Image: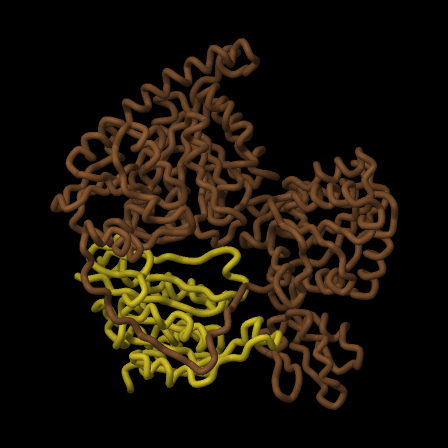
Amino acid sequence: MEPINIMIVGVGGQGTLLASRVIGAAAVSSKLDCKVSEVHGMSQRGGSVVTYCRVGGRIFSPLVEKGHADVLLCFERLEALRWSGFLRRGGLLILNDERIDPMPVIAGAQSYPGGIIEALQAGGAQVTAIDAAAIADECGDRRAANTVLLGVLASKGIAGIARETWEEAVCGIVPAKALEINKKAFQKGYERGSGQ
Amino acid sequence: MQCLLLGNEAVAFGARDAGVTVASAYPGTPSTEITETIAKFDEVYSEWAPNEKVAVETAIGASFAGARAICAMKHVGLNVAADPLFTVSYTGVNGGLCIVVADDPGMHSSQNEQDSRFYARSAHILMLEPSDSQECYDFTRLAFELSERFDTPVLLRLTTRVAHARSVVALREKEQYLLKDYKKDMAKYVMVPANAIARHVVVEKRDALLREYAETAPLNRVERGQGKACVVSSGISYQYVKEAFPDADVLKLGVVYPLPEELLKDFAAQAKKLIVAEELEPYIETHCRAIGIETLGKARLTLQGELTPAMLRERFADILPAGEAPQAVSAVTAEPAPPRPPALCAGCPHRGAFYVLGKLKLHVMGDIGCYTLGAMPPSSAIDACVCMGASIGMVHGMDKARGAQFAAKTVAVLGDSTFIHSGITGLIDIVYNKGVSTVIILDNSITGMTGHQQNPATGITIKGEKTRQIDLKKLCEAVGVERVRVCDPFDLKDFEKVVLEETAAAEPSVIIAQRPCILLKGVRRAAPCYIDREKCKKCMSCLRLGCPAIVRKPEGPSINESMCVGCGLCARLCAFGAICGRGE
């Protein structure tokens, strides 16, 4: 099986690492080879962060190359724009439609670009944009936005991983006290993603 | 058992399953999770040492005592530990000794991208380099066997993309390791010249044995492709080679010191020119050339940063024609995407200190930690940053070079953990040599940047147990600093006053700016602040704090409620009382 390349991009502190761990766990239970490359340290302090997940028959490099990503799971709009060149034309871009201003915008040196979603669509991305934080809020905690996005990802039938496998992976990774909220968040995301 | 582990975690499991007794380390990205993971194993003694030199010395002691021991550090940490490293090569070991060094090509979290393989070569220490988590596990276990078999410490070299990538690992049965007998052996362990001269001979003999081992070690393997090109590689570069050139013949090296000679020559004999794919320095390539093999490598690649499969395909397209590159999304917006550099967190205690230092326009000698971010705009409050603990030596040198007037405008800034790591010796230098410098210890009660590790100033061990706590104030007083002030960096007025007084004083002084990291458990977070639009004059002073929770809006500065932790620093700063902390 050709590797499926997923990139998770966002802002340090948004819970991207947890999402990548769920993808990894789902892949391993599906008996697929998997590599997940994380970013730790300096880059986490509110900076732009990227996690590469590769799932398939046999994986060599833990990184995804430009133009090779099948899915871009984006936790923030500007980060979706920044990393969009990694997505192959026609690839899936799942977007949490949230805006977090970076320091140059806060400092007034640069402005936050407008029309990002339109530009992504015009540029050849298949965009599914949702307000994951609001959906997570409905489920009981905004911080479960990452699980909502995972629900959307799961609904797209990525790497042939079954819904139950995704759910088990979420249960295995999310801390017990937040489990109920995250289960709901996953379900809502799945429903949104499959257009239910 | 199959599990998905970080390279670092796999090293930790490998150490546990090899029967390691003692692990000592100082945290450093990208190596930290090795020791953090070991700390979860009850059967292994683990500790955070004050610095890497002490960590290696502790592991050496454990090895001499007959135990298997490990210590892990980032590449620059090995510089700190280089002193014991070069001599433990002479003594050899009793119990197996593995020193893990994690290089950071691309400098994701580092101040340079030195190549640690040269340490192995110059200290004549066996070095293994894994390419994924399974190899991290296997090579770590093997490192202990080889250490004992060849009576040598073993260096295990990782790079960020191996250390911080998760891949599938099959764990094997744990080894029941019994401590070796401890025998006093002065000729082996007492490195005075007479003994060391004899041991140097042993090192050279060992090197010959290791070279022989490298020729046939299963860690060095040839993977036959379709003979279109011959590529030699190791570590993460091997993965990029397999990605870029699936049809090439590949010699994958797991032993990077010593490098095999015959194996390389045999392999190279099948190709006109041998491609060498390695990150950073031409370490393997220089060896190949020295033994008469023609190579293609650094002349086409780079000494800087990381390799990518795309770079390999492009640079060697004449030898291995690449397929068509896939079409990528190309999204263009009217304005370019602004960068998103890391920033001090909302509520970070360092923000108060840097605001004041920036306001006073002092020359700030910085150091390694979260507070290096004080160099970022808008505060831009740091003049120099070199290595752990260097801020103090640098401020002293500046003051000696430019005299008293200049000294009144300089300070050193470093964290509590960094001060203990290697700042204290610099402070002794200032006191001893009649310096007048001012040192500011940003004491946030944790080792922050590497992800919250305990240190001697926190009074808690790696296992979360209470222990004796170093009193920073008493420590500074004990080395002879008579002016030690403790203050809160969020009390902007008081902090400014203290800084002005201490920089003016013609004697050494230390300011301990105490406030815990906002991310620590148990640190109070208040309701978000808000801006009273009627009082706000839009002077934008609050934006100069560089707080990620304060954003610029058409109606004036605005506070992002989901990010604000209610620290109230902006409220203290605002001259018009327009910012209200709800919690206060």
Nearest the camera: B245 or B75? B245
Q: Tell me residue B193's x, y (percent).
A: 55, 12
Tell me the brown chain. Answer: B
As drawn, A118 above or below B24: below
Q: In the image as oriented, which residue stretches furthest toward the top?
A: B194
Nearest the camera: A129 or B75? B75
Q: Tell me residue B529's x, y (percent).
A: 68, 78
In the image, what residue occupies the spot 54% across and 36% down? Answer: B79
> Position of B367 compared to B81: left or right?
right
As drawn, B506 above or below B120: below
In the image, what residue occupies the spot 26% across and 59% down? Answer: A29
Give residue A83's quadrant in the image: bottom left
In the image, what residue occupies the spot 32% across and 65% down? Answer: A66
As drawn, B285 above or below B179: below
Give residue B534's quadrant in the image: bottom right
Nearest the camera: B24 or B217? B217
Q: In the image as oriented, which residue stretches furthest toward the bottom?
A: B534
- Per the rendering, the colour in which chain A appears is yellow
Decide if residue A172 is in sight here.
Answer: no
In the image, what residue occupies the spot 64% across and 46% down? Answer: B417
Quarter of the picture holding the N terminus of chain A? bottom left
Give residue A122's quadrant in the image: bottom left
Q: Tell me residue B253's x, y (percent).
A: 28, 37
Quarter of the picture holding the C terminus of chain A? bottom left
> Position of B262 compared to B85: left or right?
left
Count of picture labels: 0
As drawn, B361 above or below B429: below
Q: Tell me residue B351's x, y (percent).
A: 68, 64
